[in-house]
Amino acid sequence: MTSAERDRVGILLFDGVEVLDFCGPLEVLHTSGRFEIITVAHGEPSVCTAAGLRVIADCTTDECPPLDILIVPGGPGTRILESEETVLSWLRERFDEVGLFATVCTGSVLAAAAGLLHNRRATTHWGAIRELGRFPGVCTDWDSRIVDEGEIITSAGISAGIDMALYILESRYGHAPFQRALNAMEYDAYPSLKPNYHRPEFVRTSASQPDEGCDASQDR
């Protein structure tokens, strides 16, 4: 497959990003052989992750070329970005451009802050699920590891990004690239192999009622 035939995936990086949130999907999509992958930094190209690892992004948000897929990871740095209008505006612009917008962990909080999850179901890391539910119109899914709303996919915390990237391959690109990535990574924890995923019980404490703005009768 030539570079012209590969879809271009952008992965947003920022100070305080969780390493596995972006490296997990990156590795999955890379091993499939189906994509051109670029990392896109908010601010300076040099990013300090939540674990202290320093990463140099391929480009900044100002320099980012057109994308087919945008992946927004999470991490403690999202707490700052959710109030930065320049970032939220960039996410809205890219959402209108890409064929698929995907988040890992608290990346969904950024999507919600940008207004991209209004009237949609979504998930995130269990530690941020109530925070996500505070955004108007967001219906939080407490038990799903991956929530597919068509043009936007959200996933639970950290390692869930690996499963989400595999899900993108399987649901959007077919079995061959999915199986290629699965084999290359020697990975056997994909949700279809472990279907009984549930949040720990303590996560649901005091959460028996749907979040405000969530229509619990919706079947998406």
Image (cartoon, grey):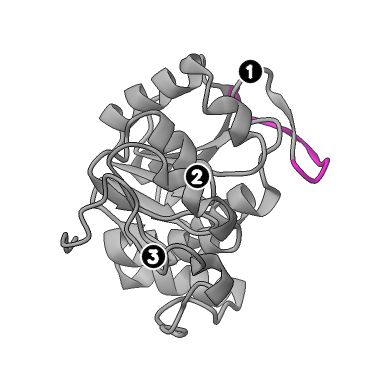
Q: Secondary structure at mark 3?
A: helix
Question: For residue 80, what is the image quadrant?
Answer: top right
The kind of residue on which mark 1 rests is Gly
Where is residue 91 drawn, in percent x and y?
41, 27
Front-most of residues 140 and 182: 140
**Disc 3/disc 2 C-alpha distance (Å):** 25 Å
Q: Secondary structure at mark 1?
A: loop
Relative to 111, 48 lies left or right:
right
Quadrant into which the C terminus falls:
bottom left
Residue mark closest to the camera, 3 vs 2:
2
66 within the magenta span: no
Where is residue 36 drawn, in percent x and y?
47, 42
The kind of residue on which mark 2 rests is Glu
Q: Is residue 58 visible?
A: no
Front-most of residues 201 and 9: 201
Up the image or down, 60 lies above or below 155; here it is: above
Considering only order in the chain, which callout, 1 or 2, is on the residue closer to the N terminus?
1
Considering only order in the chain, which callout, 2 or 3, is on the residue closer to the N terminus?
2
Which residue is tagged 2? 131
Which residue is tagged 1? 43
Relative to 65, 39 lies left or right:
right
The kind of residue on which mark 3 rests is Tyr
Q: Are marks 1 and 3 in contact (CB under 8 Å)?
A: no
The magenta region covers 50-59
Name the residue at 42% across, 31% down.
113
54 within the magenta span: yes
Report crowding for label 3: few under 14, some 14 to 19, many 20 or more residues within 10 A (C-alpha): many
